[in-house]
Image (cartoon, rainbow, N blue to C red):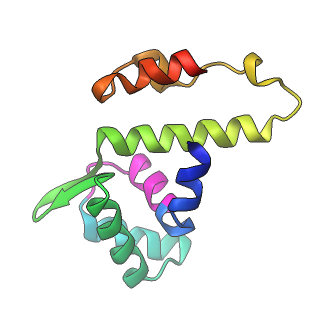
Amino acid sequence: MSKLFLKALNKSQLLLLRFISDNENERANRIVSRLNATLKVPPSTAKLNMKILRDLGLVSYGKGKPVKLTRIGRFVLELIEYWEEVASENAKSYLGVKAPRFLEEKSYVNGEADILAKRG
């Protein structure tokens, strides 16, 4: 499933998800400005990808409201980061890797965490 997210989201969207996670409660314009200043992401690219992430339900924001990851946005980001961790540690066997936080919390909608925990 993580591979699906890595292919479904482009690099700008993944970068934006991580940046929002580290800078929650900032307004959208501030995040766009900081991305441009620090990582040279063009404002038009950042705005377009923030809108796409909002349309996908991964982030929420609006007039006067800060940008936040939604529960599913946090789930997707943790799943991607977990996949990257597992993929980068090929010396370890899959079963020897500690379960990601989202499996331990079991706080996601409709029991998805329980289903994933049973599979993992």
Tell me which secondary structure the magenta stretch mostly adopts: helix
Is 73 rendered above or below residue 44?
above
Q: Residue at x 53, y 15 (%)?
A: 118
Residue bounds of the magenta highlight: 14-26
- Counting from the top left corner in percent of width and height, residue 12 is at 51, 68
Q: Residue at x 43, y 23 (%)?
A: 113
- Counting from the top left corner in percent of width and height, residue 78 is at 50, 37
The answer to whether 48 appears left or right of 60 in the picture is right
The answer to whether 94 appears left or right of 68 in the picture is right
- Counting from the top left corner in percent of width and height, residue 45 is at 42, 80
Number of numbered tags placed on the structure image: 0
Q: Quadrant of the N terminus?
A: top right
Is 112 rendered above or below residue 63?
above
> In front: 19, or 109?
109
Image quadrant in which you'd find residue 90: top right
Considering every residue shown, the one lying at the far left of the view is: 63
Considering every residue shown, the one lying at the far right of the view is: 91
Q: Quadrant of the C terminus?
A: top right
The answer to whether 62 appears left or right of 94 in the picture is left
The answer to whether 80 appears left or right of 91 in the picture is left
Q: Residue at x 41, y 47 (%)?
A: 21
- Counting from the top left corner in percent of width and height, residue 70 is at 29, 44
17 in the magenta segment: yes
Is 80 rendered above or below residue 6?
above
88 in the magenta segment: no
Q: Residue at x 53, y 38 (%)?
A: 79
Image quadrant in which you'd find residue 48: bottom left
